[in-house]
Image (tube, rainbow, N blue to C red):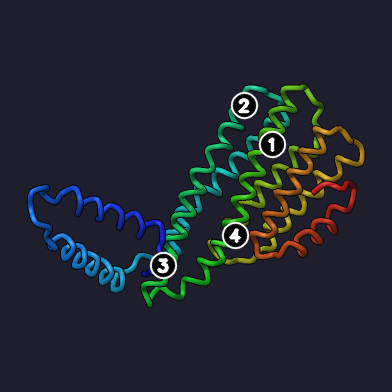
Amino acid sequence: FFGGGTILINQAAVSAILVVVLQPPDAVFSPDRFIDALIGGGVALGINYLFPVNPERLVQRAATPVFDELVGVLEEISTVLREGDEKRAERVLDRSREIDGRVRTLNEALEAGHETARLSPTRRRSLRQLEFYGSAGIRIELAVINTRVLARGVYNAVRRGDTIAPQLPEAVLDLSRSVRALAAFLEDDKGPEEARGWALEAARRATEILEERHELGISVLVGQVRSAAVDLLRSTGMDQATALQALEDAAGRASEIG
């Protein structure tokens, strides 16, 4: 009735189980638990109306670990590219896979925040910021996927003993700076220029490599850096066409990837 969010569905299921399981098998069905559920639900809605949690703070608390871990993984990938340590490359690949759990927590916080803002008139002004977070969250999830693919590509390159161009670790480090700036932008609304600037710088550095190197493995890594840069640009509010145009303006058309 109120939108069918995950939390509402789970609570309804638990209540239904309690009604069925806790009813004595030899007793006539009693509406007491149904009435109790209505009273409890009414009290919960009343408290949420009068004393709602801050949905923006709820989402920010869930988003911070995602950004921090993504920054940490990108910095670690940059270090692996410089040092060529295979065991460290394998560890960072495992670490990149663990970010998915934090992303799920962020998505749940976004859903709970939307429900709170919709049900509480005093918090409805938060809906605009939550929608912005939600739109950015979709792109961040894609950036996490690109980072995981990048970590896998780096592990394979290190395992093969590929020669890594010095621009590549710097480009990955620029991605980490862009993520950090994006987190500050979403939290403080200071403007997206810094996040966009680092993302474009990452794409520019990576694309420079293709002027001298054309191996398939290197091209794949450059492509992942460029893809992650586009996702970060779109997280700041750019549409797809504008983000791609900004990327080409900064990096040029040194390759047909991206």
Q: Residue 12 lies in what quarter of the image?
A: bottom left
For mark 3, give the secondary structure.
Answer: loop
Nearer to us of marks 4 and 3 is: 3
Contact (CB < 8 A) between labels 4 and 2? no
Nearer to us of marks 1 and 4 is: 4
170 or 39, which is in the foreground? 39
Q: What amino acid is found at the position of numbered circle 2 in the picture?
A: Glu
Structural distance between the alpha carbons of marks 2 and 3: 43 Å
The residue wearing badge 1 is: 78
The residue wearing badge 2 is: 90
Q: Residue furthest bottom?
A: 121
Of mark 2 and mark 1, the one earlier in the sequence is 1
Residue 226, position in %: x, y? 76, 48
Of mark 1 and mark 4, the one earlier in the sequence is 1
For mark 4, give the secondary structure.
Answer: helix
Q: Is residue 38 above or below residue 72?
A: below
The residue wearing badge 4 is: 136
Contact (CB < 8 A) between labels 2 and 1? no
Structural distance between the alpha carbons of marks 4 and 2: 29 Å
Q: What amino acid is found at the position of numbered circle 1 in the picture?
A: Ser
Structural distance between the alpha carbons of marks 4 and 3: 22 Å
Q: Residue, x 58% and y 40% (percent of image)?
A: 72
Of mark 3 and mark 1, the one earlier in the sequence is 3
Of mark 2 and mark 3, the one earlier in the sequence is 3
Residue 24, position in %: x, y? 10, 49
The residue wearing badge 3 is: 3
Of mark 4 and mark 2, the one earlier in the sequence is 2
